[in-house]
Image (cartoon, grey):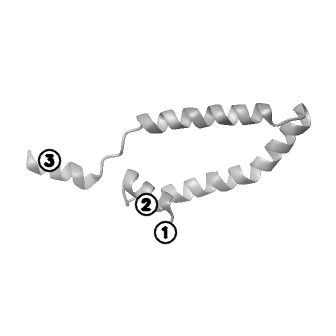
Amino acid sequence: MRVAAVVFAEFFGNKHLGAINGIITAVTQTAGGAGPLLFSTVFDMYGSYDRLFMGLATVDALMCILLIYSCRASHPLEKLKRSQAA
């Protein structure tokens, strides 16, 4: 099993795991197909990949910050246990 599937299950729960995994796979495949076109276009325009790599590094840094501050989705069973304990 892929590590991503385990992380998705832990973060979002199992109820919608297939839909979430499908969306992530579609986005990944689209980006994989568009990547070479983007890289070749930027290289043809500027003669180097420097601007593209700086932009991607910036996006990566922002995504890391968002990941750090994202909260874990609460699992429905955890809500049920908390409401029964109260």
Give the residue number, with chain letter if any, for mark 3: 83
Name the element at disc 2. helix
Find residue 46 and report its image quarter.
top right
Q: Earlier in the sequence, mark 1 or mark 3?
A: 1
Which of the marked residues, 2 or 3, is nearer the chain's N terminus? 2
x then y, percent, for residue 30 = 69, 52
Which of pointers 2 and 3 indicates the residue nearer the eye?
2
Q: Is residue 50 left or right of residue 80?
A: right
State yes or no: discs 2 and 1 in contact (Cβ < 8 Å).
yes
Q: Is residue 62 above or below residue 9?
A: above
Q: CA distance from mark 2 to mark 3?
A: 27 Å
* Badge 2 or badge 1: first in the primary sequence: 1
The residue to which callout 1 is attached is 1
Residue shown at the point (56%, 53%) measured from the top left: 24
Residue 80 percent coordinates (x, y):
19, 52
Residue 82 lies, with reference to residue 49, above or below; the image says: below
Give the alpha-carbon distance from disc 2 to disc 1, as whole Å: 8 Å
**In the rendered structure, which amino acid carries the disc numbered 1?**
Met
Say which element carries label 3: helix
- Position of residue 14 relative to residue 82, above or below, is below
Crowd tier of the residue under label 1, counting other residues whose Cα lies within 10 Å: few below 14, some 14–19, many 20 or above:
few
| Viewport quadrant of the C terminus | top left
47 or 37: nearer the eye? 47
Q: Residue at x 80, y 49 (%)?
A: 36
Q: Position of residue 85 (x, y in %)?
A: 9, 49
Instruction: Give the labeled residue for mark 2.
Output: 6
